[in-house]
Image (spheres, rainbow, N blue to C red):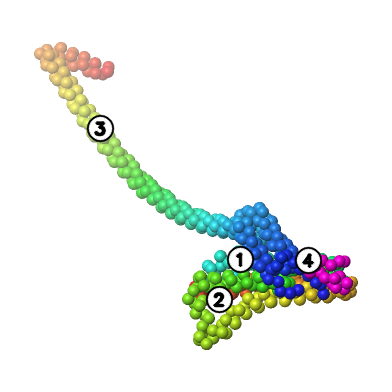
Amino acid sequence: MHEFPIWQLGPLDIEIASFIAITISALVTFLVARLAVANLSVDNPSKMQNFLEWVVDFVHNLISSAMPLKRVKPFLSLGMTLIMFIFISNLLGLPFGIVTVPHHEMLWLGITEEMVKEHVEIAWWKSPTADISVTAGLALIVFVIVHYLGLKLNNKHYLKHYFHPYPIFFPVNIIETISKPVTLALRLFANIYAGEVLIATILMLKWVGIPFLIAWQGFSIFVGGIQAFLFTMLTMVYISQAAIHDEDDHH
Amino acid sequence: MGWHWESTVYAIIAFGILYWLLSKYAFGPLFAIMEKRRELILEQMNTAESSRKAAEQQMEEQKAALQQARKEAYDIIEQARTTSSKQADEIVQSAKSEATRLKDDALKDIESEKNKAIAALRTEVGGISVKIASKIMEKQVDEKSQEQLVDQYLKEVGSK
């Protein structure tokens, strides 16, 4: 397998591929969105604007399936950012990889003499979401948002739910609360990482693997879409569970 | 591959910045535009609704006006019919009375003319009688002359 270079910057271990990938993903996401809204028009929208409006509608429907319709608006921007960023991140590692074989040791990148001798391949490119650290970051954001909103908007019921139905269930509820972001991070990471591992494996087949590669890349696009959708959906469900009291659902 | 908290922090920061930038420069304007379009459509639907109502009301008014006009026309025709028949009656009536009057006048005229003629004749006859009597009286004394006179008058009468 590939090794990922790690830049030792003082006390920080910076994994270069992840940092590049996050930056590129964010840039691409912003550029796509910015291009789509370049020439906004009420009655004559461009194709890109139509596309982004379709995404908005899609996310709007997705959120409104998790919470009452009138509560959707504040979370629309978050849902849009999540689904676009994750989808683009998922796709980023699919089309190509950048792999180099080092010829001399570069200790500041974590490349040792032995690795040079063994001709270890160094990868500079991957999906940011194929890195558990990155998906953990996203899940952490969701975790913080969910519990902040729960405390802020739904204080009493939010705190009560930890002791529901009986105080004895407190540990179970704590485990449930913690398992949510963990599964969120692991699910996304595992799906995308598995996809990239399989791509790397298929590449070892040289030209024989081309049909498999085409099929798997197609499927990976599908998986990337599904995972982005799922992450956003679950985020909204968690927000809805924590921040929006049940009684609101009866409207 | 391993756990690097730096990547986590960077991911969080990058996502935060991306969220802020997108909200401010992409989604904010887009949502505003979509909201504006929603309002535009709502407004157009309201306008359509109100114009439909106005049209309906106008239709109703026109129908009522038409009904009114029809009724008036009917009234006018009815009135004209009664007036005309009344006038015809009046004309016939007046023509009849005029004819009667003319006939009466004519009868009266005839009567008075006749009386006048009778009176005139009577005076004429009286005068002639007196004249004859006085002539006779003048010539009475003398038989001869009277004879002569009678003859003369008879002659005169005969020649006339």
Give, as a three-letter code, the residue at label 2: Gln
Residue A109 quadrant: bottom right
Q: Which mark is residue A241?
A: 2
Depth check, front residue: B134 or A36: A36
Give, as a three-letter code, the residue at label 1: Leu
Q: Chain of mark 1?
A: A
Residue A37 quadrant: bottom right
Q: Chain of mark 4?
A: A
Contact between labelled residues 3 and 4, with CB atoms less than 8 Å apart:
no
Residue at numbered disc 1: A78
Contact between labelled residues 1 and 3, with CB atoms less than 8 Å apart:
no
Q: Is residue B69 above or below residue B143?
A: below
Circle 1 residues within 10 Å: few <14, some 14–19, many ≥20: many
Q: Give the CA distance from mark 1 to mark 2.
A: 17 Å
Give, as a three-letter code, the residue at label 3: Asp
Q: Give the CA distance from mark 3 to mark 1.
A: 125 Å
Q: Give the CA distance from mark 4 to mark 1.
A: 37 Å
Residue positioned most to the front: A10
Query: Residue at coordinates 22% horizontally, 28% vertically from top-left?
Result: B117
Contact between labelled residues 2 and 1, with CB atoms less than 8 Å apart:
no
Give, as a three-letter code, the residue at label 4: Trp
